[in-house]
Image (cartoon, grey):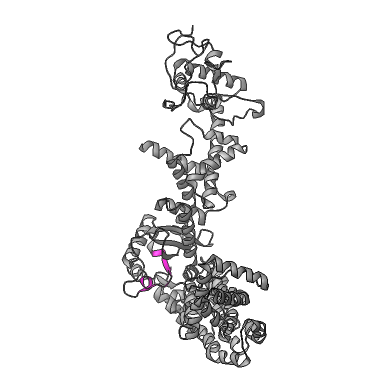
Amino acid sequence: MSTPVKRRKVNSTLLQWVTKPNTEADNDLIVGPICSATSPVSAKKSSHRQSGVDPSWKKTFPWVLFTDNEKGMLCSFCTKFNMKSKNGSGVWVSVPCTYLVRDSLLRHAKTNMHIEATDLEANSILAGKGQSIQSAVEHHTSLEKTALIGAFKIMYWLAKEEIPHTTHFASLLDLAKNLGCDYLNLLQKGESVNYTSQHIMQEMLHSLSLQISTPVIDAIQQSTYYSLLVDETTDVSVLKQLTVMARYFNQDLELKTSFLTLIDVPDGKADTLVAALKQFMTENQLPAHSFIGLGSDGAAVMVGKKTGVATQLKADLNSELINIHCIAHRLALAAAQASNNIPYLQKFKSILKQLFYYYQNSAVRMSSLKQLEHILGDPAIKLKEVGDTHWLSHETAVRAVSQCLPSLIASLEREASERHDATAAGLATFVKSPSFVCTLAMLSDVLPHLNRLSKLFQKTSVDFTLVDPLVSSTQMTLLRLLEYPADNMTNLPTRFEQLEEYGVKGSETDITSFKERIYHQYINNVVENLHQRFPDTNILDALSVFDPELIDKEDPSLHEWLQHQKLKTLSDHFTSVGSFEKVKTEFHSLRQLIAVNMKDHSLRDAMLKVIQMGDLYPALAKYCMIALVLPVSTADCERSFSTMARIKSVLRNRLSQRVLNQLMCISIEGPSSSDFNFASCVSAFGQIRKRKLTTD
C-alpha cells in the first residue's frame, strides 16, 4: 500500500503540458487541449441533467476511463500506478465510481492520490522523451505564447475590419480551431478560463491599441514642431465629439499625420474645447513650445478673434501658434457661395434636391424610372442628393440628372398624367426648360475642375506649398472657359435636338441669353471667391522665401530687399528660432546653394533638403519644418468621423469612450497584420494581467 502523501504544490504549467495524450502525428510537439487536473476549478452542480456518462467530460478530464457498460468511471493515472486513498478504498482504481456526475470528477481531481499519480505520469512522460523539467516547461511556455499570438491576431483582424469583437471573437476562435489551428486549444486553461471573457477581450484590445498609439505619442513628444487638427461633430447617439489628429516629423524626418483621440465634450463652446485640448496635451505630455499650428474648419468658435479656440490656445500655450482654416472647407464655401447672387442657380439647386427626394421616398416611382431607363437606353443611374457640406455632391448630382434626363422627363410626365401628381407636373416643366439644360451643361464643365482641386486638398500629404499653384491653375482654367467653352456647352445645340422629342425646345438665342445672364457671372463669381477664400497671409507668404523659382540663378542676391523683408516677418513672429541677423546670415549662404543645386526642385522638395541640412542651417531648417507641419486641411478629421460612425453603428453604441478610441486607433492607424509586432503586444498584455492580478 502506498504511503499517503501530503498535498503539495505542483507545477500547473508542467501538468497541463504532460497530461495531454500524445500521438505519432504530434511529432513530439504537444499542441492539443490541456488537462487541468489541478486547476482550482470550483465545483458546480449539474443543472437539470440526469445521472449518466457524458462523453464531453473527456475534453476536460482526459484521464477518465468509462466501463464497458458505462455504469462506472476509473482514473487511468491512479490505475496505472495502483494508487490508494487514505481510507484504503479502491474506488477510481480497481472499483469504478458509480456516482456518474461531473462533481465526482472534480472532487477526484483534487485528491492527494490523483495529484501524486499525475506527478508520476509527468515524470514518466518526461523520462520517455529524454527531456528535462526546465526544457519541457520552456517548450510548453513557447507553445502557449504562440496560441496567445494567434488569439491577438484574430482580435486585431476584427478591430481593423471594424467587426464587433465582443460578439465575434469567440466564434472566430472556434472556427480557427475547426480549420486545423489546434495550437489555439492551449488557450483553454480550465472550464471557465479560455481568454474569451469580456474583460479579457477588452484588455487584449487595450494592449493592441497601446502598441500603435504609444510610438505616435513618443514621436510627437520628440518632434521639433507639431500641429493639431481638430474638428467637432455629433455622433449617431447624439453626443458631441471632438476629434484630434497630429501632423509632425518622426525620427526619420518623415512627415506624418496621425489620429490621436476622440473626446466626448458636453457642448461646443470655445472654453469647453480649449479645456479638453489642454487636458489631453497635459495627460500625454505634449510640449506646448512645439505646438506650432492649429487646423480647423473655420467655424467662429474655432477662429474667433476674441474668445475663439485658437486665440485662447495662443494666449495660454504658445504665442507663436498659427491658426489655419482648412482649405477643403474654404473651397467648398467658395464653390457653394458662387451662386448666392444668381437667383436661378439657387432655384436649380432646390429642384435637384426635390428630384432626389421625390424618387427616394417612393419605391413605385423609383421602379418606374428604372424601367424607363432600360426602355430608352439611358444608364441605370440613381439620383444623388445635393448638400453644401458634402464637398463632391454637386458634381455627382448634376452628372446623374444629365445622363438620365430623357428617362427623368418621361417618368415625371407619366406621374403627372396617370396619377395627376401636381409635384411631378411642376418638376417636369422646370427640367424641360432651356435654362435647366444649359445649367446642367455649364456645371458639367465647371464642377470637375473644382472637385479635382478638392480631392487634391483632401490628401494627407498636402501642404501650403501646393495651395497657391493649385488654386492659381484652377482659376486660369475657369477663366479660359469664358472665351473657350468646354464640350458640354459647345454641344448644347446637338443636345437640344436630341431632347426635342421629349418636349425640350432650345435655340441659339436661348444659349446666348443663358451665357449673358448666368454663365459668365457664375464663372467670374467662382474665380473671385477662390481669390477671397485663399488670400496670402503674411507668414505663409514669407515662407515662400525658400522657393527656388524666386531666387535668380545668375544673381541669387537679386531682390535681396524682398528676401530680407520676408525673413524679418519670420524672425519677428518666431522669436524662439533666432534673431533676424542670425537667419539673414544663414540665408545668404543657403540661397547660393538653392540657386545652383535646387533650381529644378519644388518648394516642398527644397524645404525637405534644408531640413536635412539642419546642422548647417539650424534656424532656416526650423522655418521649413514649421511650414511643412502646418495643417492646411482637416479632411483627415472627416475621415475619422466616418470611422466613428461605422463603428458606433455596427456596435449599436454599446461601447465606452475608451473602447471607441481603441477601436478607432486600430482601424485608422493600425498597420497590416504582417507588419504588426504581436510578440511585443503579448508581452504588454502579460504586464497588464500581472498588474490586474496584483490589484485584485
The correct choice, above or below, for 342 with respect to 103 in the image is below
Q: Position of residue 341 (x, y in %)?
A: 46, 86
Identify the residue shown where x is 67% and y is 73%.
Answer: 376
Q: Position of residue 458 (x, y in %)?
A: 53, 69
Judging depth in this view, the residue of 249 and 294 nearest the camera is 294
Q: Quadrant of residue 580?
A: bottom left
The verdict on residue 303 being magenta is yes
Is residue 629 visible in the rendered image? The answer is yes
Q: Which region is colored magenta?
A: 289-305
Q: Position of residue 573 (x, y in %)?
A: 40, 75
Identify the residue shown where x is 48% and y is 38%.
Answer: 195
Is residue 551 visible in the rendered image? The answer is no
Identify the residue shown where x is 52% and y is 68%.
Answer: 360
The correct choice, above or below, for 563 with respect to 38 in the image is below
Q: Position of residue 493 (x, y in %)?
A: 65, 87
Judging depth in this view, the residue of 681 and 67 nearest the camera is 67
The verdict on residue 441 being magenta is no
How many tags in the picture?
0
Identify the residue shown where x is 40% and y is 53%.
Answer: 657
In the current view of this chain or complex, which residue is farthest to the top? 1
Judging depth in this view, the residue of 210 and 489 nearest the camera is 489
Q: Quadrant of the C terminus?
A: top left
The correct choice, above or below, for 423 with respect to 97 in the image is below
Judging depth in this view, the residue of 569 and 106 nearest the camera is 106
